[in-house]
Structures are given as structure tokens and as C-alpha cells.
Image (spheres, rainbow, N blue to C red):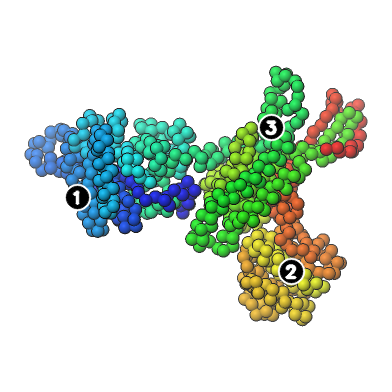
Amino acid sequence: MEETDRSRAFAKDVKRIVVKVGTAVVTGKGGRLALGRLGALCEQLAELNSDGFEVILVTSGAVGLGRQRLRYRQMINSSFADLQKPQSELDGKACAGVGQSSLMAYYETMFDQLDVTAAQLLVNDSSFRDKDFRKQLSETVQSMLDLSVIPIFNENDAISTRRAPYQDSSGIFWDNDSLAALLALELKADLLLLLSDVEGLYTGPPSDPDSKLIHTFIKEKHQDEITFGDKSRLGRGGMTAKVKAAVNAAYAGIPVIITSGFSTENIDKVLRGLRVGTLFHQDARQWAPVTDSTARDMAVAARESSRKLQVLIDHVRKSSLPSYRWPKLFCNLLQTLSSEDRKQILYKVADALEANEETIRAENELDVTAAQEAGLEESLVARLVMTPAKISSLAASVRKLADMEDPIGRVLKKTEVADGLVLEKTSSPLGVLLIVFESRPDALVQIASLAIRSGNGLLLKGGKEARRSNAILHKVITDAIPETVGGKLIGLVTSREEIPDLLKLDDVIDLVIPRGSNKLVSQIKSTTKIPVLGHADGICHVYVDKACNVDMAKRIVSDSKLDYPAACNAMETLLVHKDLEQNAVLNELIFVLQNNGVTLYGGPRASKILNIPEARSFNHEYCSKACTVEVVDDVYAAIDHIHGHGSAHTDCIVTEDHEIAELFLRQVDSAAVFHNASTRFSDGFRFGLGAEVGISTGRIHARGPVGVEGLLTTRWIMRGNGQVVDGDNGIVYTHQDIPIQN
């Protein structure tokens, strides 16, 4: 399914469109007219015409049709003996003259059937040298468009004075592609659409399965990477002229899209802003994602940038030694940033989020609207929304992160190994992180700010439903990073197809953190050698014990479910002690939930007691205003239920019996276990971590909300004065702890 793209946002404002169809689209084998494709094209153009678009058509195909008709005429008028002789090549100009009338006759017939009037305009290269001609042409076309007439243009090859009209590019236009570009400019079109026999511009021959469609042409990049003509990697000689014409028009201000004329829906998709074909646009460079490079190049760039973020002997910056005395490594330190530098970057990110609130929300609203129109679940749409309060909260969390103690290079343990031999265990960035997340664009801000604070390189892949939001947030954040670090510290992966390549880079990427569905996490774990940190589900429980404070229980249950139902730390299962059925507390809890619009499903016991539908499974994460209720015998039954059906995310007990509470806290084997507190507190910001990169339910490296510390590893630094092992002869190991003075 094609994706919408912020670079195609201009499509909503298109009114005047120039459509050029190539010979390969209008004709089939042997030069015969492809009636089916031509009919489908005319239907699309007629529909646009009736919808109020101003349509201008530039068509090829006259020479091919004329050659077919003249060959037939030549055969009819020749004797059998004449046909045995070598046949001379037919004159191209004669073919053009004969074919033009035939081509126009077909268009007339088809448009008449669709109740559309068409007009023929034959032009020559030399005509455009005359200013009066250009003025008259614009006025005539405007008159036609005002009357909903579709002008059909073609080069008048029959009387062209150029010796090689199909190769000579010295004139104002030299083929129908360049004619279409010229007309788009002359007639002030909003879009030029070049229809070809392939989907667009490829990185190699279209028939090669390894070739990828180039969605947005970046002149500075693709012009050097792709060669045309006889050595064309595209495998289509006609693409050379299209690209040349598209570049000329695009950089003069007319957006151009090259796509296939074989699809009956492509014109409609283009005008709906879907990402089909190859776009040429004067602003294309600013839309170019970091991921235009190979997956490896992108990961390596992130690693190199992350190393510049690490604190590397700050006093070297202030050293008075002449630079020629420094080793090459110390010269590189001039490009590094101190702890204060990284703190200032985060302040700039927070300020930029607030300063760009309107732009962020405008892009986000487009994502939300598209998600609603696509029929996404309400819970998924809720995760997409970037409210002013959420943007403000994100800025606050970034500032809090900036104000925290610098995590990099901290001495965690210091030991005297032997006399004069000191060993330090220090904190260090992991390296390069690949984060794959779904739906929530605010996750991008949290993850990026954590990466900056922890000195890690970062590759981000968000869900396509948040495409516009992720793109603008990525731009706001990377614009705040100094050039000394480079814009590639945080790479934004825009295509799902790039993920498999990235997951193979276990020599470059150090950790993968998936934030999304169980299916996403499982798929990533099964396809990579890179360590994976994350949680599959957020099936959180609240157990209300018989010794609870009833008012407190109602507040905690309500908040755990309703504060943000789509969050992974929201309550999905309510467990209630059996004695609470007798004193009506169970009914009070149920009333609180139902009164706030929560749909309830029951376990085998609760569904009978409360007369509610039975849940299909206890292992279900609703992410919405719905939850499961079950009645249990005691705290031991609650613990067994949580271990049997929970996801080891966050679980809570509500009770005034402290012995029961301590039993629950000790025995429930989850990443976060609470007593008399809402499960919604299970969050990096609320834990005081500044933000979180995700929540881990694993048991290795990090567990629970993962903040800066979870993105660090350790390094050992030893300082001596010439000691050697030498079989441990003559060395006395002391292994004495030394007080740490960070």
C-alpha cells in the first residue's frame, strides 16, 4: 500500500496539471494503438476535468502510428517483385503527418464518448522564440480551460526544420518530454506528470530485483550516482529525456512526477499525495532523509557522530601545547563536546520543540486525519496525537534530562590492584542504537534526547502512520545539533524495507530496542544477532486485596485504566479478592469503571458474578477503554494469576495489610511492582530518569523503564608505572578499594 509523504503535500493545492504520455504508453507492439490504455487514460483525464482540474495533455505516438499505416499502404501499392527488394526506411516526417491525424481521431472519439471536448495544438521549437506567439498561446489555452476543453499538444514533426528532432537538444525543446516541461512553465502549471512504461526512476535496471524505486530525486545525489544513455543503469533509454526535462522544470519551480501510465489509478494517487513514482522538486534536498545512504553507511555515520559526543578529556581543549605536539587522536578531540555542550544541545532541543509547536501540530494533524480516514483503531489514533500539553511535557522532560548529572565517564568503582597500579570501572555509551517504534511520535523525542545525553548514535524507524510527525520532529532535533557532531548522529529510517539490512549489521549496531506489538518484537528477535531490549506486551494488573482502603482502591483502579488507556503501563486486568464481592466493594469498583465508559470482560468467575461477557483470553492487551476483571481467592492466587498471564511489565497491590503487601512485592516477578500506587507511574519521566527509551521486561542489562543508565555500558581503565605480569612473579596484589571522587 502506498504511503502519504510530506514531500507530496503540494498535491492538495494542484489545479492546473500537464500530463505527458509517452509512445510506450499509447502504443503496443508493432506500433499499434493500445486502445485499452488510451481509453483508461482518457477516462482519468475526463474525471479530472469534471472535478474542476485544468488538464493539459502532451502526447506522443504519432510517428509510430503513422509508420504502421504507411507500411500497410506501401505493401498494398507494391507488386510482389517490389516487395522482394530491400525496403527503404520510411520518412519520419511523413509518418508524423499521417500518424498525427490518426492519433487525434482516436482522442476525439474517446473524449466524445465521455462528453469532453478536446482541441489539437501542434507547435514547433522555433515558434517559442516569438514573444507574441507565447502570449497568444497562453491566452488561447486559458480560453479553452475556462470552457473545460482539454488542449492536446504535440510537436509538429512533419514540418520541423531540425535535422535530427529526436536527438538534437540545442533548441528550446527537443522532444515531447522537454515540450511538456516548457509548457508547464509557460502555462504556469501546478504539476507536471510524465507517464512512462515503468513506475519511475530506479537505482538500476527496473527488471533487476535489487533495483529500488527512487521516491524523491535529489539532484546532488542521484545525478552522480546514475548514468543514462547506452550505459544506462535504468535500462530505459527514454528515461534520459524524461529526467532531463523533469530536472529543468522542477528547479524552475514546477513539481514533476514520473510514474507508470500502465496503472489506471496512478494519476488519482498522485493527486491524493500518495508516494507513487519519482518526485522532482526544487525543495527535494531538504526532504532527503539520512537513510538515502546504505544501511551500513548510515550506521557507521551514527557511530562516528556518537564518539564526538562523548566527554574526552576536557582539559585538552584548554591545553597551551602547540598542535604539532599533539598526536592525531588529540587533534580529533577538538571536535568533541563537553558535558556542558551536550547539556546546551538538550536545552536547544527543548526550546525548539516549543518554538515549532504550530508546525509540529500541523504536520501531526495530517497524520491523525490520515489515520482516521484509514480506519485505524481509536487507541492507535490516540497515540498519534501531539497536543500542546504533550509538546510542553516533552520539552520539560528534555530539560530535566539536561539538568541530570552527566552519565558518561563516571567512575563506578576504583581499585588498587597492586602498588602503583590503579583500575577504574567507568560508564561508557553503548555505541549505536536502532529503535523501531510504532504510532507514538513523542517516543522519537524521548529516545533522541536520551541518545544525546548518553552519547549514543541513534537510528530511528517510526510507524508509517506517524510519518509526517516523525519527520518534522527529527528535523527540529537535528537542527539543534552542532555541525561539529554532524547531522547523522540521529538517522531517520523512512522505509520498512531498510530494516532487514540494518538488522544484519551486528558489527556496527550495538542494541535494538523495539517498541510496539508482540508481533514486531518477536519478528525482530528472530531475525537479528544484535542484542534486543524491550517488552512485547503491557499486560498490567491491579490486585485489590480484602484489606484495602476502598476510596484509595477506586482512585488507583480508575487512574491505572483511564489516565491514558493506550499506554503500555495502563491496567489491563483487575483482580479482586473474593471477600469484596460480599461487602459490595467489587460492585463499587465496577461502577467506577463502567461509569467512565470502560468495557468490561470477565474471567470465568467474574463473568458469572457480574453478568458481563467472558474474556477470550487473559493474555490480551486492550490499549483502550476496556479491561478484564477476575475474582481470586487470596494474594497467592493473585500472584499465580499474574505469573501465568502477565507480561512482567508492571503490577500493583492495593492493601492496608503490610505483610500481604511485602509478600506481593517480593514474589511478583515483574519489572515494576507497586504497593498502593497507580501502574501509570511506571514511566521513565515519573521515575526521575528524565525520559525513557522504552520499558524492558527482560532480565539482562536493564529492566523496567530504561533511561540514560540503561543506555550505558562499562569500560575498564588501568593506570600504572611500568608494571608487567611476568608470570605473577614479584608482584603483590592488594585489591584495595579506593574512595571515588568523580
- CA gap between label 1 and label 2 equals 77 Å
Give the residue at x 53% y 51%: 363
Query: Callout 3, which amino acid?
Result: Thr
Instruction: Judge the density around disc 2: few (<14), some (14-19), many (≥20) Cα neighbours within 10 Å.
Output: some
The label on residue 555 is 2
- CA gap between label 3 and label 2 equals 50 Å
Query: Callout 1, which amino acid?
Result: Ala
Mark 3 or 1 closer to N-term? 1
* Image label count: 3
Q: Disc 3 designates what residue?
A: 336
Give the residue at x 78% y 73%: 550
Give the residue at x 75% y 39%: 408
Q: Disc 1 designates what residue?
A: 105
Whether residue 93 is situated above or below residue 325 in the rendered picture: below
| Rendering coords of residue 497 (x, y %) | 52, 47
Mark 1 or 2 closer to N-term? 1
* Callout 3–callout 2 Cβ contact below 8 Å: no
Whether residue 732 is situated above or below residue 399 in the rendered picture: above
**Left or right: 728 with respect to 636?**
right
